[in-house]
Amino acid sequence: IPCGYGGTTSERKGAVNGMALKKLPIEKAFMLVEPGPVLLVTTNDGRKNNIMTITWHMVIDFTPQIALTTGPWNHSFQALRETKECVLAVPAADLAEKAVSIGDCSGAEVDKFQKFGLTPLPGLKGKAPLISECLACLECRVLDYLEPYGIFILQGTQAWMDFERKERRTFHANGDGTFVVDGETISLRSLMEDKLPSGV
């Protein structure tokens, strides 16, 4: 649960209908469903490569279609709108500080691949580069942009995975500058097999 609950003493101690649940300030509610993992989104605007860090994204279906939220405050936004392509790169936990730092500077001012010592690799489906140091990469094309909400709908076109990478844990934003690193994996496949698509 997000820390920093700001309610009154009586609200903190009180319970609704005898339950242990207590009120959480609505401005902290997004932290309950902040998605993961942290992603690095690459673009190429025809002149240079760029990277932005994204935590607000959602899988829509198995094909896969993916939604992500960004806007004109990000330098990559115009490249996404114009080229209609990007790569979603999944950094592992050993790249956490670097991923946060990437999100803290602008591609309009620096070459992020050079500044952060990352290696761009050519994809198969477009000009947006893969990131060699990442655990996985997904080449995507933009299907739609829902302007009132700043939501891009992406279609994955080619997936890549580094099967030999030692650090494989991804990390997830809480929304307040703290992050959760993946822990133990439990398998409940036997309960879900009738809902999983072939090959998953």
Image (cartoon, rainbow, N blue to C red):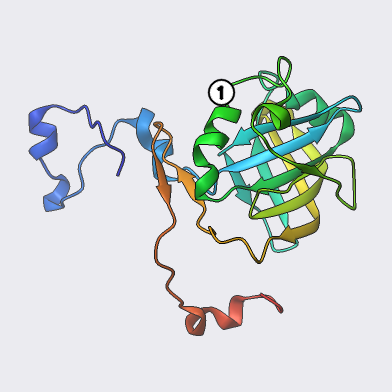
Outermost residue on the top side: it is 109
Q: Position of residue 33 (x, y in %)?
A: 45, 45
Check the image and report above or below for 95 versus 187. above
Using the image as rendered, state which of residue 157 and residue 106 is in the foreground: 106
- The residue drawn where x is 39% and y is 31% is 176
Locate residue 114: give its quadrant: top right
Using the image as rendered, state which of residue 131 and residue 56 is in the foreground: 131
Locate residue 78: give its quadrant: top right
Locate residue 164: give its quadrant: bottom right
Check the image and report above or below for 60 versus 100. below
Q: Where is residue 175 in the image (x, y as percent from the top left)?
A: 43, 35
Position of the N terminus, as image quadrant, is top left
Using the image as rendered, state which of residue 200 and residue 29 is in the foreground: 200
Check the image and report above or below for 179 versus 7. below
- The residue drawn where x is 74% and y is 26% is 77
Q: Which amino acid does label 1 sit on?
A: Asp
Disc count in the image? Answer: 1
Question: Mark 1 Cα within 10 Å, few/some/many (few <14, many 20+)?
Answer: few
Using the image as rendered, state which of residue 160 and residue 188 is in the foreground: 160
Q: Is residue 62 left or right of residue 190?
A: right
Outermost residue on the bottom side: it is 190
- The residue drawn where x is 41% and y is 40% is 174
Q: Is residue 67 left or right of residue 46?
A: left
Q: Name the residue under label 1.
A: 104
Q: Where is residue 173 in the image (x, y as percent from the top left)?
A: 46, 41
